[in-house]
Amino acid sequence: MRFLAYVLTSLILGILVGHFYSPNFGNLYEIMLYILILTIGIDLGMSFRLKEVKRLGKTALILPLGTMIGSLLGAFLASLLLGIGLKWGLAIGAGCGWYSLTGPLIGQYSAVYGTLGFLANLTREIFTVLGYPVVSKRISKELAVSMGGATTMDTTLPIITKFGGSEVALVAFVHGFILTAMVPFIVPFILQF
Amino acid sequence: MNIFIPLLLGLIIGYLLRIKDKKVNVDKPMSAALLLLIFFMGVEAGKVKISAGWLLISSVVFAALTIAGSLGFAVLLGGRR
């Protein structure tokens, strides 16, 4: 929660600085992005163990794929509703709640859609925190995990564990983990078109 | 530079560190890079004239529909129960 406050402060401060002073930081943005991607890669490389993922069974492996496809379909619909180019819309949806990566990745190409990608995915995380307790009562607790997207391995894991139980926590962790491994490849892939 | 290059490089470094049983804490550099990156993203967004209302509504629409899509597909895969 404290880090989220830092993130929002950073964004608001940046918007104010950009609005009032319009400074030019050269390619610092890109350098920071590459450093972030490199550290994400190191983190994934150190922690990814295929054997442990396989042990959880079929549902835990298929669910992240369903989450990603469903998210892309939802983003497709949102793009049509809001009149936003499909490339931007699908890239936003492919973020699956990982706002801190999706925003900057899209921001390389468009500041406006980068900010939208950031806020839309942040809103998804907030909706998951608020909505999981309700949704998990209406559908299976394991399947309700899909609403959190990639965030189910960290930020939304506590709420899922509290309302879904410890068995669901493991599914949620693997679900988030697989999506976390997919998102850094899928968002840039969509943006290449 | 293609984004996949630092990502793949990171994956290889991470894998090599793991097989050598060396643990590196990337939390702090990751957080610092992230906060700076978001600041720079905000700066670029601040330079562009953009309606805050449009941004807010679009964010909510995207969040609601991507969640609905994911849940819908999950139910399709696993059944309601």
Image: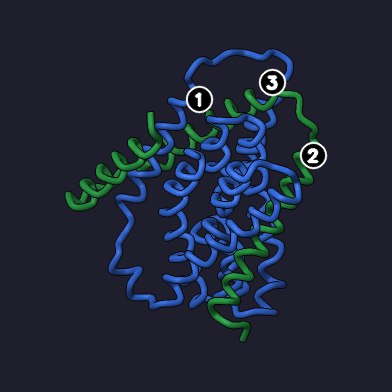
Choose between B14 and A162: the one closer to the eye: B14
**Residue B23 horizontal side relative to residue A24, left or right:** left
Report in which chain the residue with disc 2 lies. B
**Residues under numbered marks 3 and 1 in contact, where contact means CB atoms less than 8 Å apart:** no
Pointer 3: residues within 10 angstroms few (<14), some, or many (20+)? many
**Residue B7 horizontal side relative to residue A135, left or right:** left
Choose between A180 and A160: the one closer to the eye: A180
Choose between B40 and A79: the one closer to the eye: A79
Q: Amino acid at mark 2?
A: Trp
Chain shown in blue: A
Does residue B29 sit above or below A52 in this rendering? above
Say which of marks 2 and 1 sits in front.
Answer: 2
**Residue A67 horizontal side relative to residue A20, left or right:** left
Give the colour of chain B.
Answer: green
Pointer 1: residues within 10 angstroms few (<14), some, or many (20+)? many
Report in which chain the residue with disc 1 lies. A
Q: Amino acid at mark 3?
A: Lys
Report in which chain the residue with disc 3 lies. B
Task: Residue under label 2, please give it.
Answer: B54
Percent across and percent down for residue A56 are 38, 75
* Image disc number at residue B47: 3
Pointer 2: residues within 10 angstroms few (<14), some, or many (20+)? few
Percent across and percent down for residue A142 are 55, 75
* Image disc number at residue A29: 1
* Residue at 50 percent of width and 25 percent of height: A29
**Residues under numbered marks 3 and 2 in contact, where contact means CB atoms less than 8 Å apart:** no
Q: Amino acid at mark 1?
A: Tyr
Percent across and percent down for residue A168 are 52, 75
Mark toward the start of the polypeptide (3 vs 2): 3
Where, by quadrant of the figure, is residue B27 drawn? top left
Where, by quadrant of the figure, is residue B45 drawn? top right
